Amino acid sequence: MIKVAIVVGSTRPGRKADKVAAWVHDIAKKRSDAAYELVDIQDFNLPLLDEPTPPSMGKYTQEHTKRWSAAVDGYDAYVFVTPEYNHGTSGALKNALDYVYKEWNNKAAGFVGYGSAGGVRAVEQLRLVAAELQLATVRAQVQLFLSTDFEHYTVFKPDPAKEKQVNTLLDQVVSWGTALRTVRVKG
């Protein structure tokens, strides 16, 4: 059975990503096709890139980087929960992605975005970053709108129909994550 991380992609005070990720995790826990865990980038206290060598070299000197590397390396696939800030993802999530390299390679990724436009522009940016990190992104994604999935634009109350979208996303992430595991074993 593969391991899937549901990544909380914001560290902002008053963030909504933790509630959205918990909702995704609650849906995932009803399934038996993978082991699902929440991973909150806030728990790693990653400053703006502070390693002296590029992540592709894998020579980490900072303890927070080593902890983050071990965490990322322990999963076969990821579901990134991202806000959309100013037509893009959060700086904290981009920074966390940039910290390591080989740990992401040949794994699967899916996206749950939220914001005034459903997080679609943040997800599109993340797809480009994921390609460079050799993460295979799945087609399905979940879009949550501040106007319809958040009461008064603040309290997370998703449309019940969104659960089906989450399950479609998880179906694809698990399928691709399982297939890519064989690539990593051969490599």
Image (cartoon, rainbow, N blue to C red):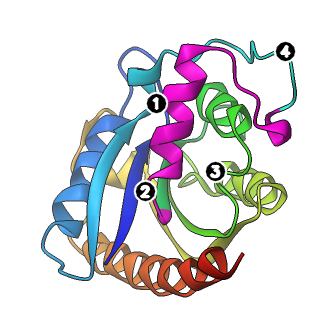
Q: Residues within 10 Å of mark 2 (few under 14, many from 20)?
A: many
Residue linked to disc 2: 144
Q: Is 7 located above or below residue 50 in the figure?
A: below
Amino acid beneath label 3:
Glu
Answer with mark 2 or mark 3, whichever residue precedes in sequence: 3
C-alpha separation, residue under disc 1 versus residue under disc 3: 15 Å
Q: Earlier in the sequence, mark 1 or mark 2?
A: 1
For the point 12% across and 73% down, the residue is 30
Earlier sequence position, callout 1 versus callout 3: 1
Q: In the drawing, what numbered circle is on residue 103?
A: 3
Along the horizontal axis of the image, is 125 left or right of 142? Answer: right
Residue range highlighted in magenta: 55-77
- Would you say residue 2 sits in the magenta stretch? no
Q: Secondary structure at mark 2?
A: strand
In the rendered image, which quarter is residue 60 located in? top right
In primary-sequence order, the first of circles 4 and 1 is: 1
Q: Main secondary structure of the magenta part?
A: helix
Give SS at disc 3: loop
**Residue that mark 4 sits on:** 52
Q: Is the N terminus in the top left, top right, bottom left or bottom right quadrant?
A: bottom left
Measured Cα–Cα span from mark 4 to mark 3: 18 Å
The three-letter code of the residue at mark 2 reads Leu
Q: For the residues carrying marks 4 and 1, which lies nearer the camera in this image?
A: 4
Which type of secondary structure does the marked residue at label 4 adopt?
loop
Q: Earlier in the sequence, mark 4 or mark 3?
A: 4
Residue receiving disc 1 = 41
With 69 as the anchor, is 175 left or right in this view?
left
Q: Residue 94: x and y, percent?
A: 68, 35
Mark 4 and mark 1 in contact? Answer it, CB < 8 Å.
no
| Viewport quadrant of the C terminus | bottom right
Q: Residues within 10 Å of mark 1 (few under 14, many from 20)?
A: some
